[in-house]
Image (cartoon, rainbow, N blue to C red):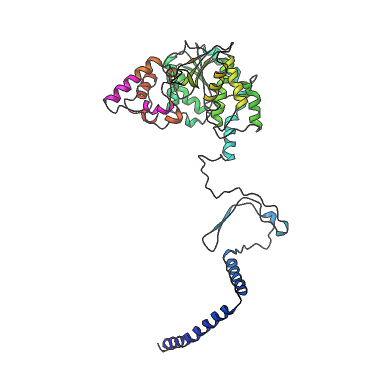
Amino acid sequence: MYQSSKLYSDYLLSLPCLSHRKRAVSAFLFCLPPSLFALLLLFLLACNGFSVFYIDVPLPSNFSPERVTREKKVTWLSSSLMHVVKEEDPPLILKTHLPLLHKPYFSAVPINRSWGLRPKGRLGRQKSMVLNVVDKSRRFSAEVKEFFKNSKCKSPRFFMTWISFIELFGERELLSIESLFKSHPNACLLIVSNSLDSRTGRLLLSPFLDKGFKLIALKPDFDSIFKNTPAKPWFSGLKKGNVDAGEVSLGQNLSNLLRLALLYKFGGVYIDADVMVLKSFNKLRNVIGAQAIDLETKSWSRLNNAVLIFDKQHPLLYKFIQEFALTFNGNKWGHNGPYLVSRVVSRVSGRPGYNFTVLPPPVFYPVDWSRIQSLFQGPRNEVHSKWLCQKLQHIRRQSFAVHLWNRQSRKLIVEEGSIMDQIMSDCCIFCNFSRPSL
């Protein structure tokens, strides 16, 4: 207790002395010339900055720059307000061998992968999945001809493409096949697909084979399919990396080209896997459907390629393929599909040598993509119920098929009493689907 009191009394005695020293230091600083005072402040700031940002990186005694592996580090500085990101750039090297500075590969702006550039790894895997096929596919043309010959199928011949993962081939796609055979029980269906030509794919399609329907899934041989067409040099450039695949799905763009080449080589009907067939196509020949019309001129304003019916080696198909190869753009959705067929048809219409018909929207596209949700909604009230009945009757009377516009309707729920609910009941063969998940 005595020692504490003594220390406190000594502290009180020293306060006047400390105050005197403080006044003396302040007086000394104010007496300094301004330039010298500024230099002193700069020196103090430099010392403070050095103490904040200095990082001591210990190196082992046997350190060698060649042994340092590239790695990405995040080092937090002592100020806790900043961090340094060391990217996968050159390893640590001696100061006597400093290289030229390179532009860093990171950005301060967060990257959203849904709208930003695709990482090269993902694009590489996509190209590998789409383009790599086994040796068996080299007999593609022979297998197709053998399938059509042995199946003794009656016209028309149907084609689908599925350039995607088998896990994505779900109830909607299977219902599309059901609708096809419901309207064409003696037809043949060839599905060109890497993923479906597999053990899992055959198991998935086996219920149709067990029912006696004629269908097969084959891996594509692109070189054989594109041979003797303008698509061949384009595809060779794609494989060599001379063609920019772009941001739009490569599988989607290859499907746009593949459907054209298949019909040009073999002739028949192509339908997308989200098309529900309502009536027989037997009387349709060399036709393409309009997606929209100009209300003033009553002429078509846009065509679509979800349903194509053409003879073998039809000149319009050749023009489509030629346009694809010459104007391919992998960064614009629809440029190589609906917009392509619209461009070509607008140029060749009226020219001699082209024999085809443009069918009005109700035939294949009775509902535009912007209103597709109306097919999935159940009746809200009496007025809405009457409208649904009238629209359903209109579709049954005028439409040969209904395109469901997968991009816009994939996540929609089929409500009870909706037009889609009725179409599913009309088109199904097994009728074992789950309505909400279609």
Occupied quadrant, residue 385: top left
Q: Is 380 included in the stretch rendered in magenta? A: yes
Whether residue 197 sits left or right of residue 135 in the image: it is left
Image coordinates for residue 422, horizontal then vertical, percent: 35, 22
Image coordinates for residue 398, horizontal then vertical, percent: 40, 15
Front-most of residues 295 and 96: 295
Whether residue 172 sits left or right of residue 243 in the image: it is left
Residue 99 to residue 271: above or below: below
Occupied quadrant, residue 402: top left
The residue range painted magenta reads 369-391
Farthest right residue in view: 96
Image coordinates for residue 88, horizontal then vertical, percent: 62, 50
Q: Is residue 136 visible?
A: no
Front-most of residues 120 and 425: 120
The rendered magenta stretch, by its main secondary structure, is classed as helix
Image coordinates for residue 407, horizontal then vertical, percent: 46, 30
